[in-house]
């Protein structure tokens, strides 16, 4: 059974930061693999949220110049996101 849960964004960011500090190199290989998979998926979720926010800035832009700037930022983030996903 798959269930989605909601956690505060600040908690998610703190969790990712905490996990990045841990040194799991001395642990069993399967634990390391699970650790890196979990960290990767959490970072991916943060990137998706950033991408969503960037898109929202396009929609909410007050004028054409702001919309163009927001669109360029969105496309840059989208390219970074696609490159990260392609690496995996």
Image (tube, rainbow, N blue to C red):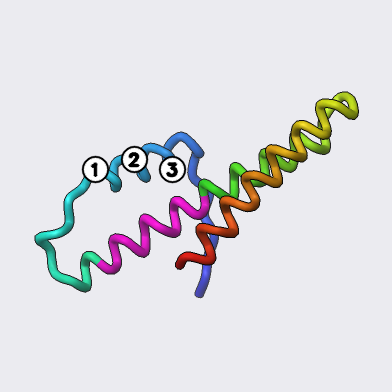
The secondary structure type at the circle numbered 2 is helix
Q: Would residue 69 be counted in the magenta stretch?
A: no
* Distance (Cα) linking label 2 and label 3: 9 Å
The quadrant holding residue 53 is: top right
The answer to whether the residues at label 2 and label 1 have Cβ atoms under 8 Å apart is: yes
Percent coordinates x, y for residue 60 in the rendering: 82, 32
Q: Would residue 36 be counted in the magenta stretch?
A: yes
Percent coordinates x, y for residue 68 in the rendering: 82, 34
Q: Which mark is residue 57?
A: none
Residue position for label 2: 17
Percent coordinates x, y for residue 11 in the rendering: 42, 38
Residue position for label 3: 12
Percent coordinates x, y for residue 41 in the rendering: 44, 59
The secondary structure type at the circle numbered 3 is helix
In the rendered view, tell whether residue 41 sits above or below residue 50. below
Side (left or right) of 66 relative to 6: right
Local packing at callout 3 (Cα closer than 10 Å; few below 14, some 14-19, many 20+) is some
Side (left or right) of 25 relative to 53: left
Which residue is nearer to you in this view: 60 or 65? 65
Side (left or right) of 80 relative to 75: left
């Amino acid at each position: 059974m798959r269930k989605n849960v909601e956690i505060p964004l600040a908690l998610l960011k703190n969790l990712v930061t905490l996990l990045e500090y841990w040194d799991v190199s001395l642990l069993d290989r399967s634990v390391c693999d699970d650790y890196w998979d979990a960290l990767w998926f959490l970072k991916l979720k943060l990137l998706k949220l950033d991408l969503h926010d960037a898109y929202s800035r396009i929609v909410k832009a007050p004028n054409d110049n702001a919309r163009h700037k927001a669109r360029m930022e969105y496309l840059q983030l989208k390219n970074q996101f696609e490159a990260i996903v392609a690496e995996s």
